[in-house]
Image: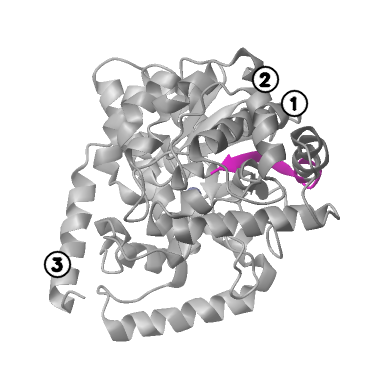
Amino acid sequence: MMNRVAVALLAALSGTAGAQLPVDSALAAFIGRIRAVDNHSHVNTAVPRDSEFDALPLDGLLPSPTPVRLRPDNPELIGVYRTLYDYPYADLSDAHLTELRATMVRVQRERGTSFPEWLLDKAGIEVMLANRIAMGPGLAPPRFRWVSYVDALMLPLATTAERAATPDYAALYPLEDRLLRRYMKDLGLARLPATLDAYLRTVVTPTLERQRREGCVAVKFEIAYLRALDFDAASRAAANVTYARYVAGGAPPRGEYRNLENFLFRYIARESGRLGMAVHIHSFEGGGGYYSIAGSDPLLLEPAFNDSSLRRTNFVIVHGGGMYAAHAGALLSKPNVYLDISAMTIVYSAATLAPILRSWLEQYPEKVLFGTDAWGTWDVYAVLGTETARRALGVALTAMMRDGDVTRERAQELATMVLRTNASGLYDLHLR
Ligand SMILES: [Zn+2]
């Protein structure tokens, strides 16, 4: 932990730097009033110690470096704490943070099930998509909309070989096993059916249909935590054989399992589209010390995006591909591909995010969605992410106005699209 003087000094400096980012003040005020739709979050329910905010929580992984903006001594947090909890201090000393934590617990207890909505109002978010295993107290439509997890449906066979590859895989694969058991229990099934056809008919499709019935607007793959995103065309016949041979026990060879996974990925995507749910796919440079960054390049998804049988499915590249932002932007030329800026709004500064946003807005502004990826102390990250997004949009659009690329009216329209109406159109939220 830095000493108190250094933290306070940093806070002052970052405040100054923020003020110096060139943003048109009338435009900034306009952007500040837009009630946002957050495309991606891991919001908690009002239940203490809620554990259903992620199918693959990263707490079980070996320690790895934390990006600077996520560290508890990030001086930007002072402003966020002030906005949310009337934090009266200009530093982040241990004593003051202890006091803050007590305030947070008290406010959450006092507000009970209304806490999540109270937080949305504070952050200027009208609708938050909740990427969770299940919804719960405090998280109801229309303010909160469910995004489920479907990776587990892709992994019906033993993953012994996969788990051996890295310590992260060893920790994460068993969680998918557990989730598939839960999905089967929800359907009243004790064991997997003997054939792939029966598995699709009695487990995969009914699970997706149940999720849709219970309000899902999208399903999420966080499969980049478990393997690369190259879901190439698969042999159905070979998938049938692999499934039938190993469903009762034993681990399939890696190549055979990949073919089955590829087949199931496309099947799940097709069914989700048929049911009116978008498909979210995690693509970012992390997290975890063994995470495959090369394997999360969204360009690896191009063969799947070019599958003509998947054109009724809308895909969203969640986190905008991170360091592969240019690749994600190029993929927006596919009619059914979108992206969001979640996680970027928390990990990157507004100054770093602004030119990325501009490059996308110059080509396919209808496909760019706002998001935070708020998790853990989600209340804090919802505000930090929203403020960062508004500032980055202000910087990008001010530069576009200055260069004569857009009028002020069009700049306002673009900000509204990214923060609100693009998502409203994609999920039929009927917001104007
Ligand atoms: Zn996430």
For mark 1, what is the residue? 274
Q: Nearer the viewer, mark 3 or mark 2?
A: 2
Above/below status of 38 relative to 108:
above
Label 3 sits on residue: 9
Which residue is identified by label 2?
Answer: 312
- Whichever of callouts 2 and 1 sits on the residue coming sooner in the sequence is 1
Which three-letter amino acid code belongs to the residue tagged 3? Leu
**Callout 2–callout 1 Cβ contact below 8 Å:** yes
The residue type indicated by label 2 comes to: Arg
Please identify, in this view, whether the residue under mark 3 or under mark 1 is nearer the observer: 1
Which SS class for mark 3? Answer: helix
Element type at mark 2? loop
Front residue (pair 232, 151): 232
Reply above or below: 288 against 409.
below
At label 3, counting other C-alpha atoms closer than 10 Å, the crowd grade (few under 14, some 14-19, many 20 or more) is some
Q: Residues within 10 Å of mark 1 (few under 14, many from 20)?
A: few
Per the model, the C-alpha gap separating discs 3 and 2 is 53 Å
The spot of residue 126 in percent (x, y) is 60, 47
The residue lying at 55 percent from left, 21 percent from top is 233
Position above or below: 301 against 179: above
At horizontal 56% and vertical 28% (from top left) the residue drawn is 315
Q: Amino acid at mark 1?
A: Arg
Q: Is the CB–ligand 1 distance for label 1 below 8 Å?
A: no
